[in-house]
Amino acid sequence: MEIDAVPQDNNATLNGYRKAVYARDASGRIQAVASSGWEVEEIVTTQAADSLRRQAEEALSAARAGTGSTLAYWMFERRMDVALLAQGSGRWQWQVRRDLLPGRWSALDARTQARYAQALGLTVETIGTCP
Amino acid sequence: MSLAPFAHRHAAHCESGVMANLLTHAGAPVSEAAAFGLSSALSFAYLPMVKIYGFPLVSYRMPPKAIIKGLRRPFGARLRFETFGSAEDGRARLDALLAKGQAVGAQTSVYWLPYFPPEMRFHFNAHNLVIYGREGDDYLVSDPVTEDPVRCAVDDMTRARFAKGVLAPKGLLYTLESLQHPRPAPEHWRRAIRSTCRNLLAPIPIVGVRGMRMLARRIARLDPTAEHSREWVGHVVRMQEEIGTGGGGFRFLYAAFLQEAAEAAERPALAAQADALLEIGDAWRMFALRAARMIRGREPFVPGTLAGLLNDLADRETQFFQTLRRIVA
């Protein structure tokens, strides 16, 4: 890639940050230049972020309707899935899946609740509610 | 090792950037590209059994910590690694090192670093940065992927250092204790290149050019009508271009290394290979571009086309690394 071909697409996902990209200058030397982003990266990052956001929104409506749990909402809100939450809390995935059932949260013992709170970086009270 | 102010340099990749900056700080001026190449960090692996948000891991470089550890031999460097059982111990140890004026490498989770752009904060646990001081409740941080040094609250940094999950950092800190060869010998440069050729041409189905072909076969099998297939391809591109400056970016970085190596490894023919690799990097970017256009519906979603591009890349890289291997033999 030549230096003048380095994309400067002002990616919204980079929020003003610039990343270093290596390209060839006029004298043929390859060096790092700052790039404000490439549209391609923005497309795929937005796709991934939207997918997580959509899951969070669905979980939120389910939690409000009582057909889902508040823990499920906070899991997606914190950009986690069952695998990540299991690793973060030190629980088995099947336990996490069970704990995501509606109404299950208040039945958990205080120690387990605290483990989820720690993994999500939230307080126990917050996880029991939804915004 | 020295009390000089820490010189921050912007880098394409966190681990090579951290090591280049730490080595330079310790008196061995080295570019990011040299740190990346001398540790033989370029690679390719398709690991369908490792899932990230439910998608397979596609990696364009060696596993985390390969650069840090790979630089020990060429520089004759002694590194000290420390992990901690509790966040409190980890924080105290970091503060003690900083009080001595040390620049300290640390492994963190991107998700918990508040200065990162919100959209970029995914749960990725192997992000490297240098902490070079503390002022009040803030650490002074040289994060190689940011243009300038940043500040990060002590509590946030501690949280990021003790994130759980795959590749959990466990508060990992590393410091350079001593350094024997500020300028690695030409043979070290050649050895590093040979090792990269061996990786890319490895006779293992999920690694190197064979891994690319396996990924191509998997993409060709995707159902063109399913939304999930678009997310699958988007994930591959994201691993390539966004996470640690994957495929195209790593090829450009390695090209910069080969350009330096032409002189440092005493193999002038490497300069032409640097240009050849830039062209391959452009082809990787073309693959990403076509994929993104298909995801957005700007051209019909045809997995077979993408698989074909990937197979072409595997062909070109096979030829490229065979030539490279002959030059440094």
Image: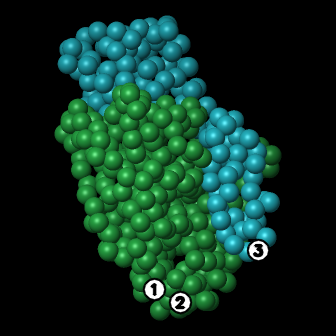
Chain colours: A cyan, B green
Residue type at mark 1: give it.
Pro
Query: SS class of the residue under badge 1?
Result: helix
The residue that appears at 50% across and 89% down in the rendered structure is B328
- x and y, in percent, of residue B154 in the image: 37, 31
Position above or below: B45 against B158: below
- x and y, in percent, of residue A28 in the image: 73, 74
Left or right: residue A123 versus residue B264 is: left
Q: Distance between the residues labelled 1 and 2?
A: 6 Å
Q: Which mark is residue A27?
A: 3
Left or right: residue B257 versus residue B128 is: right
- x and y, in percent, of residue A129 in the image: 41, 8
Query: SS class of the residue under badge 3?
Result: loop
Position above or below: B37 against B324: above
Q: Name the residue under label 1.
A: B186
Query: SS class of the residue under badge 2?
Result: loop
To which chain does the residue with label 1 belong? B
Q: Residue B266 carries which label?
A: 2
In this orientation, which residue lies closer to the viewer: A101 or A32? Answer: A32
Q: Residues within 10 Å of mark 1 (few under 14, many from 20)?
A: some
The residue that appears at 26% across and 55% down in the rendered structure is B81
